Image: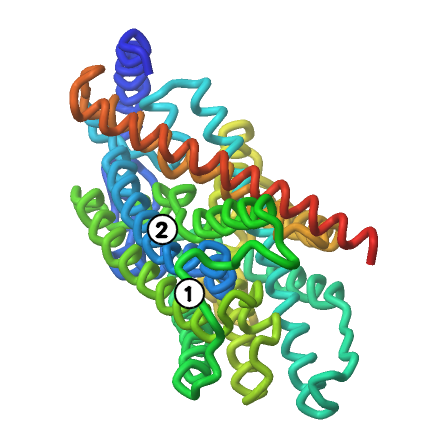
């Protein structure tokens, strides 16, 4: 950013923050001091939401990623974890305006308050593209796991060489129908129970995958590994090796980032004036936990399968027995992805519904809540017509896209590579520079911008590898 741009952004920041001065209201028992519903989140609910969003089924593909890079990939995972932790703390600092203390309820609001309208639009494009892409990817991955359960039982009964072909489409439709119901949870602050279940199940399947890989290693059936991974030779050229390494980095980048929903998670924390410090602790706990799990799954998986590691240890049938344990692990994956789907979709739901309330503040269709009553008993739930219709439409569209994009996993890796740099690095770094009024060409400014530039180069390389991987998968499909 140029010096004049920093000055302009400071002016934007003051204007946007001051515009919220009149929005504060006297709080009652159910409202915060800004008139919004009282927040009840804590350090542990924030950790549960972060882990639900971060530890996806992609953790089971890290053995493949390590096979492409070799044991050097362990260092890469650790570095990405450190970068994510550092930039997430920078982003947490931008939750409140420094002048007035006004909250930024979403990532986009934080960008607008600090960097202005143009960056606000760019952030929205990157953030919502990623979140919608993740929802599609989770639908596909959940269907793959459900198919894996059926195929596991088939292999157990008929032998490992049996042609146990099963269609994914009915399972994608089933996932969509279930998400229609779950999506009626009003906002991300009220889904802590679902996020706890998702967190527990994510540890469950990751632990099962790591345990099966570990048992393979200690039984003496581990495959050959190397410092640099897959070796150039018969079946793989130097160019293919390079592209696969870049794609593996893209997969690791996607596993590392949760910045797209960090501000939304931070906005669920209790209004105690210390949301920033609580979120920083949640960042430390969550990133440490997820990075440790990544290393365990990646290292044990690579040691078990070597350079021939599967893209997914549990659905690629690197293991066949015990079949019931494979079924349990894939059931955990599905349960986790149901929660993860909601964590990434809730910011999209909230953005559309907030805009509708601004446009039509008196419309009953938009604002009216109808309590659910069975007999004479009222439940602590209600139906809103906008929420009901809009969220059903969203889930239906996501399901149709999942059905239409059989190779979306490759596109998802591309999406992760592209979104990592702006959402995890660029916006947090430059908002922090504006917040703390860091002067241009100082040592601190130079260090932050150097991190920014290096991560851009890494993301570009990963994006190129992901594009090549998608083209390769499409080529194989056409000639199969």
Q: Locate the C terminus by quadrant.
A: bottom right
In percent of the image, x 52 and y 70: which residue is there? Answer: 333
Judging from the image, what secondary structure is the residue with disc 1 in? helix
Hey, which residue is sitting farthest top in the picture? Answer: 4
- How is the structure coloured here? rainbow
- Give the residue at x 41% y 45%: 261
Could one spot residue 387 in this view of the protein?
Answer: no
Q: Position of residue 53 (x, y in %)?
A: 43, 55
Q: Which residue is mark 2?
A: 76
The one nearer the camera, 205 or 114, is 205
Q: Which residue is mark 1?
A: 298
Compared across the picture, whether 35 is left or right of 249 comes to: left
User: Horizontal and vertical percent for residue 317?
Assistant: 61, 75
The quadrant the N terminus occupies is top left
| Res 325 seen here | yes
Q: Which of the marked residues, 2 or 1, is nearer the chain's N terminus?
A: 2
């Amino acid at each position: 950013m140029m010096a004049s741009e920093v000055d302009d952004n400071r002016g934007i920041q003051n204007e946007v923050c001051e515009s919220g001065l009149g929005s504060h209201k006297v709080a009652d028992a159910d409202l915060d001091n800004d008139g919004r519903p009282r927040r009840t989140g804590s350090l542990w609910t924030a950790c549960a939401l972060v882990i639900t969003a971060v530890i996806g089924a992609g953790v089971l593909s890290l053995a493949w990623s390590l096979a492409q890079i070799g044991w050097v990939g362990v260092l890469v995972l650790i570095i990405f974890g450190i970068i994510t932790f550092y930039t997430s703390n920078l982003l947490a600092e931008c939750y409140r305006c420094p002048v007035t203390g006004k909250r930024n309820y979403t990532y986009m609001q934080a960008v607008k308050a600090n960097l202005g309208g143009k960056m606000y639009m760019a952030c929205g494009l990157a953030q919502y593209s990623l979140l919608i892409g993740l929802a599609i990817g989770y639908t596909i991955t959940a269907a793959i796991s459900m198919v894996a359960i059926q195929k596991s039982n088939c292999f157990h009964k008929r032998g490992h060489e049996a042609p146990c072909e099963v269609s994914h489409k009915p399972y994608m439709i089933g996932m969509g129908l279930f998400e229609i119901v779950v999506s009626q949870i009003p906002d991300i602050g009220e889904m802590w129970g679902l996020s706890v279940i998702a967190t527990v199940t994510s540890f469950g399947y990751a632990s099962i995958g790591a345990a099966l890989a570990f048992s393979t290693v200690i039984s003496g059936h581990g495959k050959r590994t190397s410092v640099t991974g897959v070796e150039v030779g018969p079946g793989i050229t130097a160019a293919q090796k390079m592209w696969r390494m870049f794609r593996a980095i893209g997969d690791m980048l996607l596993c590392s980032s949760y910045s797209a929903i960090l501000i939304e998670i931070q906005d669920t924390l209790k209004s105690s004036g210390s949301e920033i410090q609580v979120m920083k602790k949640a960042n430390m706990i969550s990133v440490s936990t997820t990075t440790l799990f990544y290393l365990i799954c990646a290292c044990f998986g690579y040691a078990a399968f070597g350079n021939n590691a599967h893209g997914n240890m549990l659905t690629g049938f690197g293991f066949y027995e015990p079949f019931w344990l494979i079924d349990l692990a894939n059931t955990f994956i599905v349960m986790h992805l149901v929660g993860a789907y909601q964590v990434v979709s809730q910011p999209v739901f909230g953005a559309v519904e907030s805009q509708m309330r601004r446009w039509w503040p008196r419309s009953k269709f938009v604002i009216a809540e109808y309590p659910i009553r069975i007999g004479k008993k009222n439940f602590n739930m209600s139906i809103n017509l906008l929420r009901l219709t809009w969220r059903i439409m969203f889930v239906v569209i996501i399901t149709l896209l999942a059905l239409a994009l059989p190779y979306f996993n490759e596109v998802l890796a591309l999406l992760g590579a592209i979104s990592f740099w702006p959402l995890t690095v660029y916006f947090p770094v430059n908002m922090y520079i504006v917040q703390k009024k860091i002067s241009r060409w100082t040592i601190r400014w130079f260090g932050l911008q150097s991190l920014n530039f290096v991560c851009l180069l890494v993301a570009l390389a990963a994006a190129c590898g992901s594009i090549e991987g998608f083209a390769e998968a499409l080529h194989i499909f056409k000639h199969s």
